Image: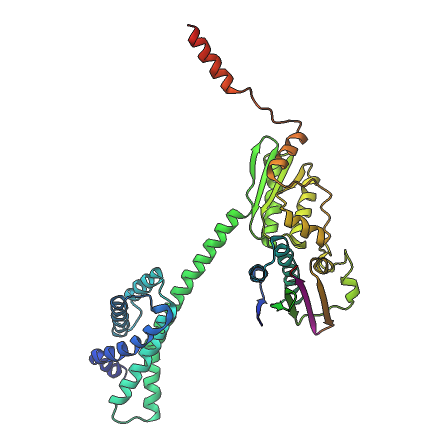
Amino acid sequence: MDFQSCVNIKKEWDIVGARQLGRDISRKVGFGTVDQARIATAISELARNIYLYAGTGKVCFEVLEEIDHKGIAIIAMDNGPGIREISQVMEDGFSTSGGLGAGLPGVKRLMDEFDIQSEEGKGTEIRVVKWLR
Amino acid sequence: MDNKLRNMALDYSNEIVDMWLEEINGQKNNAYMAAISDEMFDSTNREFVNVIFSSIEKQGLTSELDDFSERLINLGWPLSYLTEGMQIFRRVIIDFILKRSEQVDSDYFSEVLRKVDGWVDPIINRLVNEYSGSWESTVSLQRMALQELSAPLIPVMENITIMPLIGTIDTERAKLVMENLLDGVIKHNAEVVLIDITGVPVVDTMVAHHIIQAAEAVRLIGSRCILVGIRPEIAQTIVNLGIDLGKFPTKSSLRKGFKTALELTNRHIEETENKHDDIERMLDSLDRE
């Protein structure tokens, strides 16, 4: 099944839309309530980062189906200012907006795979994967 | 010229109406119109075209137009039906006029276009305004309704107040939560406030951050905050995110939180003596008599 769908993030309420779609997809894939909550929270963090730092962007979902396991990939893309020091944002407690600074490191802990690419002035793309166990 | 065109349109209105009706019936195949019965569709079409002609005749927007659009809004007809209807009308009437004209040069042509636009465009604008006005008022009413629901504060008993939160918390709502919480604590003279997040679907770092700030603010004004209604899956995501909620007590359910609140205000729940005993005693005494 090659399935990909996206939600554009423009307003704060789009975060809710992205979360809802992600939750629906993860339910269909077969995740339990705990993992659904993890996935929804991760989407919430990623979408909020787009809204807060880049203004606009999109969150895409992909259902992964391999021979031995299934999963969901979430790709958050934006053309925002980018991240200068990636190792810094992956530290707990680092925040430029006065938040808790747990967002990205938290997402990494919530999910199984975490991949970030960012170029200053060009934008950021984060791809996270959760596998069904 | 002005009146000539108008009189022409009015004189041949029957033919124009027939042409228009034929065209608009083609629109019936659209998915959103399929649920409407043929008679309903037909009568609405006739009324619509009459409204158009009466506004051409009176050279201005009429109250009939307002009534008509208001009724369609209430019935939930899509705006695209009206705009398409007007576009078809424009097409049909220009076709008709040009076919009847002996000589068509570019001046005449642009004159006809300008004239017809003068009939059609004000109606379209009015219809679009009516529709968007009704949507805007619906949205603002819903926003108000949502705001009323967003951060209620319930003084359950002396010194204890509960704030149940249901649904998504965005920045605007988080602000309201904070304001209402602090206002309410002072107003109700609450020593303990229970924030119930059973109905909050996702607790991410932003929501957690706002809750921590609210609890801290409550602490500053001399009261205590207990966070209740933490579902198991939410507890796990909070741990994964690495959020520290250790600064104030948290409980899994409102019931446990309420018990803690009673303890904090030096009270506890005591069950009264069994009422059945009383009744049996009364029955016994009756028997004896």
A93 or B85: nearer the viewer = A93
Image position of B267 with respect to B11: above or below: above
Q: Splitting the image into 4 quarters, where does residue B23 fall?
A: bottom left
How many numbered circles does the render carry? 0
Kindly identify the residue that appears in the image at 27 percent across and 78 percent down: B22
Horizontal placement of A103 versus A4: left or right? right
Query: Main SS of the magenta segment?
Result: strand
Judge whether B225 appears above or below B66 on screen. above
Q: Position of residue A123 (x, y in %)?
A: 69, 72
Residue B120 appears in view: yes
Extreme front residue here? Answer: A68
Q: Taking A129 as reference, is B119 left or right?
A: left
Is B155 left or right of A129, judged from the image as shown?
Answer: left
Answer with the quarter of the image where residue B51 lies. Answer: bottom left
- Residue name at image x 59 percent, y 45 percent: B198
Magenta stretch: residue B68 in it?
no
Q: Is residue B128 left or right of residue B53?
A: right
- Which residues lie in the magenta part? A122-131
Which residue is located at x 52 percent, y 50 percent? Answer: B147
Q: Is residue A124 above or below residue B260?
A: below
Location of the C terminus of chain B (image quadrant): top left
Residue A59 appears in the figure: no
Q: Which percent across, then down, holds residue A81?
A: 70, 70
Relative image position of residue B196 (x, y in whole percent)? 60, 43
Q: Nearer the viewer, residue A33 or B75?
A: A33
Q: Depth check: B147 or A72 in front? A: A72
Residue B38 in picture, x, y percent from top left: 26, 68
Q: Nearer the viewer, residue B274 or A1?
A: A1
Residue at screen point 30% across, 71% down: B60
Q: Quadrant of the N terminus of chain B?
A: bottom left
Against A54, residue B93 (above or below) is: below
